Image (tube, rainbow, N blue to C red):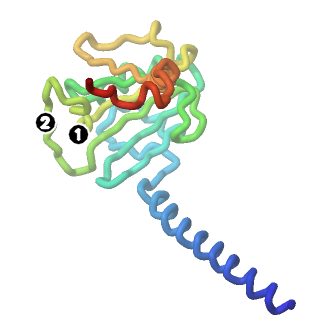
Amino acid sequence: MLHLKYSVQRPQALQFICIAIVFLCIVSPAQAFYSVSDKGTWPDTWPKELEPLRDQAETLQGPTLPYLHYHITFEDRAKFEAAWPHLLKLKSKGAPVILLRSPYTWLGNIKAGVLVHTPPKNQALKSKRSETAKNDYLHDTYIELIVDGDIVDLNRIPFPADTRIIDKRFEKIKKKAVKATQPKATKENSAPAASK
């Protein structure tokens, strides 16, 4: 009887181990898409006024091509406002500034900051701009701004007149509102109308 109990539990244990191995194989490559440095490793060609920000920055490289993403957090409005004009100099001509809602949770819980996205090092990617392309800026250096209304206050910073602003601060809220207003599917309203 004891032997029967053991043989029944053994396949369940093997099944659990197999599921755990498959899960680890799927999840572990996802963690390797980005390499991370805990300081700003941007080139020396960037404005010298940004040099003191290296220690409060992170550098991510990835996901598939070696795109570089520099994330600079700010805890002081005056420091952000002093750095802002120099950060704008990094943006490619015609590239947008994208506004993101605080807190930004992709890289942790960030209240206010800037993400500078650049094409791969030593690789000139030609931007194929078109007026209708949704993400025509992805091969340029562009800026994402994490807006909290206190440290990063849009009423206190200038934007160049020719800069396109993409406001993504309320996208999740809009998507939830659209889902809430859509009628729930029932047999009456999901079945096609019968032809007479």
Q: Residue at x 43, y 25 (%)?
A: 189
Q: Residue 130 carries which label?
A: none
Residue type indicated by callout 2: Lys
Residue 109 seen in render? yes
Q: Between 151 and 9, which is closer to the camera in this rendering? A: 9
121 or 183, which is in the foreground?
Answer: 183
For mark 1, give the secondary structure.
loop
Between 46 and 37, the one lying in front of the other is: 37
Name above or below for residue 64 compared with residue 95.
below
Classify mark 2: helix, strand or loop: loop
Residue 56, placed above or below residue 19: above
Q: Which residue sits at x=41%, y=30%?
A: 190
Q: In which quarter of the image is residue 196?
A: top left
Image marks 1 and 2: residues in contact by CB distance under 8 Å: yes
Res. 169 in view: no
Q: In the drawing, what numbered circle is on residue 139?
A: 1
Residue at 57%, 28% (x, y): give it.
103
Percent coordinates x, y for residue 1 in the rendering? 86, 91
Residue at point 33%, 26% (across, down):
193
Task: Give left or right: position of 104 versus 44.
Answer: right
Residue 128 got which mark? 2
